[in-house]
Image (cartoon, coloured by chain):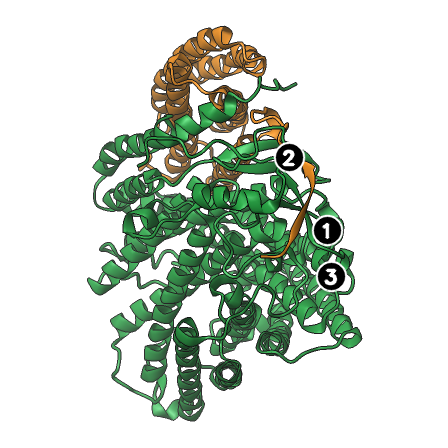
Amino acid sequence: MSTTLPPRAVPEPGRAPESVAELIPHLEETWKQPPGLWAWLRSVDHKSIGIRTMVTALIFFLLGGLEAATMRAQLARPENTVLGPDAYNQFFTMHGTTMMFLFAVPVMQGLGLYLVPLMVGTRNVSFPRLNAYGYWVYLIGGAFLYVMFLLNTGPDTGWFSYVPLAGPEYAPGKRVDVWAQTITFTEISSLVTATALIVTVFKNRAPGMTLNRIPLFVWAMLVQSFMVLFAMPWVATASQLLAMDRLVGTHFFNQAEGGDPILWQHLFWFFGHPEVYIIAVPGLGIVSSIVATSTRRPVFGYPAMVLSLVATGFLAFGLWVHHMFATGLPQLGESFFSAASMMIAIPTGVQIFCWIATIWAGRPRFTVPFLWVLGFVVVFIIGGFSGVMVASVALDQQVHDTYFVVAHLHYVLLGGAVFPLFGAFYHWFPKMTGRMLSDRLGRWQFWLFLLGVNLTFFPMHQLGLDGMPRRVYTYLPEAGWGRLNLLATVGAVTIAVSVVLLLINVIRSLRTGAPAGENPWGGETLEWATTSAPRPYNFPLIPVVNARSPLWEETGPLRGVAGLRTDVCDVLVTTLLDAEPDNRHRHPPPTIWPLVAALATGVTFITLIFTPWGAVIGFPLLFLGFFGWAWPHGRDHREQLSIEAERPVEAGP
Amino acid sequence: MTEMRIVGNVGNLPTTTFGHRSMAWWGTVGFIVIEGTTLFICAVCYLYIKQNFPTWPPEHILRPSLIAPAVQATLMLVSNVPMVIVDRAARRLDVATVRAGMMIMCLFVVVMCFLRVLEFQALNVRWDSSAYGSVAWATVVAHATLLVVETAETFVLTALVYSPRLEQRDVSAVSDNALYWYFMTGAWIPLAALVFLSPYLM
């Protein structure tokens, strides 16, 4: 670590720089991201953390996909022997847990971490160390789950871990405890990331970016982050209660001692239903970005779009009981939640009509990202239709726990999240790497994926109506489900080929892809106003905006404010509503302490599975980790004293 | 890189702020929301599980003792008076008052931890005796984690304000810590009423 301060601030506080070029060498020095493993472990840059979160999530996506492919191989014909019942239970549990907790939420948050600071015109996420800590906790949790899976201790009671099946009586051993602690890891990670994103949007927006000028993707991430804040504690608490029932003999879910298995379902689905929208809402934001860029006009009905996102966020919390229609609820409750479930189609419908109006009035270019948007509309709407169907209690009772529901949830999640995500991938990959992905391979990938998804999941509607239950490892030939299952397996292979094409496309592009330039698609928002890939400081000046689509509506060079220190990682803090410059905040330099704290967290939670002494070992470790983080020392301390020496503090009210 | 032109200078803006102007304050609010939700969930579980019992507490189980919880609740309420003084002193950058105040807060938090141990005893039930015991313990444990975090934070901040390494932002952190303190002590009152008083009322 350097023992001397970088060169003095340029310009001196209070003096305007003579040119932007004067600032750049100093910004490069102060914000540099050195190569090497040690620097990588210490990085607190939002782009680095965002990309590694997305890459890690995509690796988990591949693993979850392999699990799915293995299950499809098993189900391709009756009485198959690829997987036995025990392995099959672990596979579907791992698939669901991986896709929901280790892929879908983290990948969307990773994308948000990368893009939100760029779109709002700042230099980093609001709490860079906390953000790095969130990533490490997520990585430790995911790695822990897979290590235990390889040791034949993978969870086997479904991604929802219903009690009493997951309770101490019917699930001895450590499998369910592994699931419960994995949940704790991923929820901590999601919660700290959501907090960092909310504060970034609230306090770090470029001057002039009032609430009604925030890009729709940023609105989507804001709504998603609030949903995370209010939804994730439910599953985190529930999984701890389950762990306590299993490890220290409590009775939360034990009917014999006054506990209640249905309580688990309430707690789980109060998280679990918003979870669907936590995954899908960023997808809606992605679609808005791609639609605007591809049609070369701002999305029609901005206020309606924003209100729809917010309404979706609220309504998502009123639907959880529709997962529990088969538990014998009072009829009034069923009616209420049935109506609420149908009501959420309204804000989604509003957004879809706004996109159609935008496309109608614009000049659409059928680029690869735009194809993914069109695929999203088709697949998501099919999922929405079957959703409105199962919102009806009478129909739900018939198809509950059948493949009809498997079809519905995959249409919704693949349509609502994976199609937009792949679109986002093609849309922003050039910004992240400076290189374009192959258009031809992209089109092949899209059509194969669209075909594969429909081949895999459409027959499952029929299988469900024919009575095929979920989560069975095999079936008899007399059931007559063989042909449709084989078709679904062919579809799964098609999806796998499509994903391989994406990997080939990425590798080829990184080696020989065409240079992207700053704004290859002609985008409207601020991330397109900087280099591809962006420099570590994002923008040489903090941009000033006075329009919703600054790159389209403002003429002349992009405007910016100077005056932030260039010898420390200085960022601008603005007011919540009007984004007026308010104060300056120095971000910390790279540090190893988030990783240390995450390792302490990992040791604590993993040890707790095996012995209550984990608390005795873990809490001192946690304290040391966070103490090292918080105690002023090193470059961080010197920089802070330097910046505080500038002028007397402005004491608050 | 896209050409940019300079239209303003923000170099004279302050670098240490308090309350909603400070990013750390917003981070504290975020954690209050998360932990507040967790405590709310405990209360929901408590009321949900209560429905399964014809009597509350269940038969043959003593009702909770009230002395330790009453002292704790009173102490938590009273502790906000010195904390408000510390908060205001921090906002004036009156480090001398902050130092003295934080020492007093250390005393408060140590006594609160001691009382928390007595509160567990005052439940008069084991966590593994029935779902009643489980949920009563879980609610108190959930709040105890906040108390442990606050204890660690109070001690570290006290060490900081006495340290030659003190930075202005640490004084702002004292103010943010005050916000967390108001939340921690305020949230305990309804929870304590639920766990310790409701068995007498329901």
In which chain is the residue bearing label 3?
A
Chain in orange, by letter, is: B
Residue A31 point in image, percent of width and height: 45, 44
Q: Colour of chain A?
A: green
> Which residue in the structure is indicated by mark 2?
A16
Q: Quadrant of the C terminus of chain A?
A: top right
Which dot, 3 or 2, sits closer to the camera?
2
Closer to the camera in the image, A107 or A316: A107
User: Which residue is pictured at 51% across the width and 86% down the height?
Assistant: A451
In which chain is the residue bearing label 2?
A
Q: Quadrant of the N terminus of chain A?
A: top left
Residue A232 point in image, percent of width and height: 49, 48
Please identify the quarter of the rendering in which residue A600 is found: top left
Residues tagged by mark 3 and mark 2 found on one chain of the structure: yes
User: Can residue A262 be spotted in the picture?
Assistant: no
Residues tagged by mark 1 and mark 2 found on one chain of the structure: yes
Q: Amino acid at mark 2?
A: Ala
Compared with A560, B66 (above or below) is above
Label 3, secondary structure: give it: helix
> Which residue in the structure is indicated by mark 1?
A213
Q: Amino acid at mark 1?
A: Arg
Are discs 1 and 2 less than 8 Å apart at CB? Answer: no
> Which residue in the structure is indicated by mark 3?
A552
Q: Amino acid at mark 3?
A: Trp
Are discs 1 and 3 less than 8 Å apart at CB? Answer: no
Could you tell which of marks 1 and 3 lies nearer the N-terminus? 1
